[in-house]
Image (cartoon, rainbow, N blue to C red):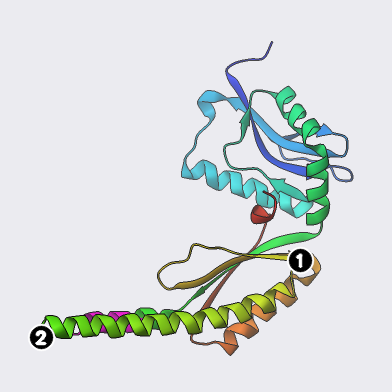
Amino acid sequence: MPDERMLTCMYAIVDYSAKRLNMPPLYPVAYKDIAAVVETACKERLAFDQQAAVEYGAALDVLNETFTLLPCRFGTFLQDERAVLQVLQEHYVFYKKKLEELRGKQEFGLKILSEKSVQVRNANNKKQCKDGKEYLLQKFYEYREDEERKRVNQKTVDVIHEELQKLSSMGVKNAEISGHVVFSGNYLVEKKAESFFCSKVEALQGMYPELKFLLTGPWPPYNFCR
């Protein structure tokens, strides 16, 4: 009879055909040649705070060094090991296919910022308008300048994204950007090509000094295993 005071937290689905896990208190629940990496704990010990999220992410980073993995969403709890095993059995074909797609690859994230647009906007905000007509004209010119900057920036980041996609197995552009962030995307990169990918980003930064590139990674493939 299951202990109702306990829950099993899933960290990731991993390829378990060659290597073995030694990360207590984490342990594998295996099915065929895949496994779920889990931790079983009392409900009272479980927390959904920032520290718990950081520790969860750190565990995934360590797993990513050894295994091909599909990271689970933070806070994925099941009743017990039998429930975990049932998930593996029901979705085995899907998990196996995704693990094959991700084998030998890691994720990089890229944000591109246009600091110039912020500086121009701040300078315009400091201008003092004498009357309502001048204020409306200033806002119109600011709007027109913003639209032109957006057009130029969009053309530039499209070129950058296309260049980086050539060096990755897959790339995704995030739709939600705001403020001085003009681009946000993620790339799935072969481990053997990581250095070349990073050097390409550095070269692109040199070609577009008016933009600021923020490259992060390598990470587990969070954005490529949904």
Quadrant of res 117: bottom left
Residue 48 placed where, x, y %? 49, 37
Q: Residue at x 83, y 52 (%)?
A: 100
Q: Residue at x 29, y 85 (%)?
A: 141
Which quadrant of the rendered structure holds the N terminus?
A: top right
Q: Amino acid at mark 1?
A: Ser
Residue 127 placed where, x, y %? 20, 85
* 97 is within the stretch colored magenta: no
Q: Residues within 10 Å of mark 2 (few under 14, many from 20)?
A: few
Label 1, label 2: how many angstroms apart (C-alpha)? 56 Å
Quadrant of res 167: bottom right
Residue 42 placed where, x, y %? 57, 23
- Magenta highlight: main SS: helix
Determine the secondary structure under disc 1: loop
Please give the residue where the numbered disc 2 appears in the rendered image.
Answer: 130
Nearest the eye: 226 or 21: 226
Judged left or right of residue 142, residue 73 is right
Nearest the eye: 103 or 156: 156
Query: Is any part of residue 175 visible from this angle?
Result: yes
Magenta segment: 119-128
Q: Residues within 10 Å of mark 1 (few under 14, many from 20)?
A: some
Please tell me whether residue 128 is drawn above or below residue 41 in the rendered image.
below
Query: Is any part of residue 29 visible from this angle?
Result: no
Please give the residue where the numbered disc 1 appears in the rendered image.
Answer: 169
Nearest the eye: 126 or 196: 126
Depth-wise, is mark 1 or mark 2 nearer the camera?
2
Residue 202 placed where, x, y %? 63, 81
Q: Amino acid at mark 2?
A: Lys
Give the residue at the far left of this rendering: 131
Please tell me whether residue 221 is drawn above or below residue 130 in the rendered image.
above
Determine the secondary structure under disc 2: loop
